[in-house]
Amino acid sequence: MDHDIIQFGLYVPPHPHPLLSPGASEGYQRLRDAFDTCRERIENSDADLIIVYSTTWPSIIGHQFQANPNSEWVHVDDDFHYLGSMPYSFTMDSVFAEACVEKAQERGLQARTVNYDAFPIDTGSITALSLLNPDNRIPATIVSSNMYANRSETIVLGKAIRDALTEEKRKAVVVVVSSLSNRMFTEPIDPSEDRIHSQKDDDWNRKILEFFEDGRLEDLSQLSREIHGQIRVQKVVAYKPAWWMASIMGQHNNYDGEVLAYEALNGSGGAVIQLTPSAGSIGDKEFDEDDVEYYRGDRNVLDQGGV
């Protein structure tokens, strides 16, 4: 069932270098080549929808879904503006975005669509969709990453989107846009000399990649708090993507994993990874992190109408 609903999942970096300056270093070019491989795989799949969860689109109140049927503008990245402009024109599935909002609200979440001209699409989403779906062959939906959402809320969000996929009888490729480690250099560097910011970051990045290669998505989700504590990146970058990815794809370890590229991006860790649902499993473990079906607020403090 997982493979029918989710064709496969991708984990890709948010930085614009593979899009705007792939030739600046061999590492950037390897990331670009990996994006190109994933683009071909999407084209050859049965997917009729791309769902992007972007850590560079933060939301404060609830969860937002991009629903403008044609999102078009020109973006310049805040940090890497010297790389140039990022014009975009994306086809969004507004009907599916509305379905996601409905299912999210049914599970107790605050959610809404965003649908107006010139809404500023974020760098990570632009990079991912420009490289993975350059001709808008498949409509997309972009999901925000709520800055204050805890594990329960993030898990429920993924399940709500899966509800919409099931009800709408859609087949999707899910794309998480996120760094691994995210400490970057604060002074200009020669792209040819780019490297992971520290040995500790590199060591933990490679440990994360081992989990992905083994298809251990749920294990990674369960251990993500520990990983976050070790590499000290922002919450929105570190463990939320693993929680969301596991909840929408399936909370188990039955995946074939492939790391197509792992490179430094101005000191941060950037990887292109594919997870494909499979029949086999490396084995399910028991952890302290619980599962949740409905969101009722932090420690059940939301008003439940007298319940």
Image (cartoon, rainbow, N blue to C red):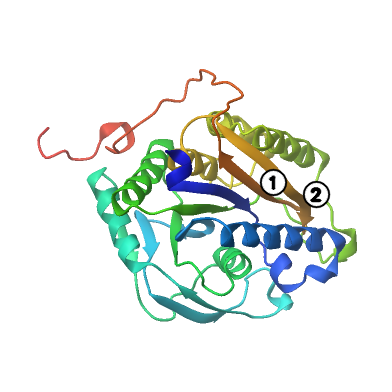
Residue 14 in view, yes or no = no
Residue 196: image tag: 2
Q: In this orientation, which residue lies closer to the viewer: 86 or 78? A: 86
Q: In this orientation, which residue lies closer to the viewer: 300 or 20? A: 20
SS under mark 2: loop
Total numbered labels: 2
Left or right: where 183 falls relative to 60: right
Q: Quadrant of residue 217?
A: top right
Q: In this orientation, which residue lies closer to the viewer: 259 or 191? A: 259
Residue 181: image tag: 1
Left or right: where 92 falls relative to 298: right
Residue 108 position, x and y percent, is 25, 44
Residue 99 in view, yes or no = yes
Residue 41 position, x and y percent, is 62, 56
Amino acid type, mark 1: Ser
Residue 119 position, x and y percent, is 43, 75
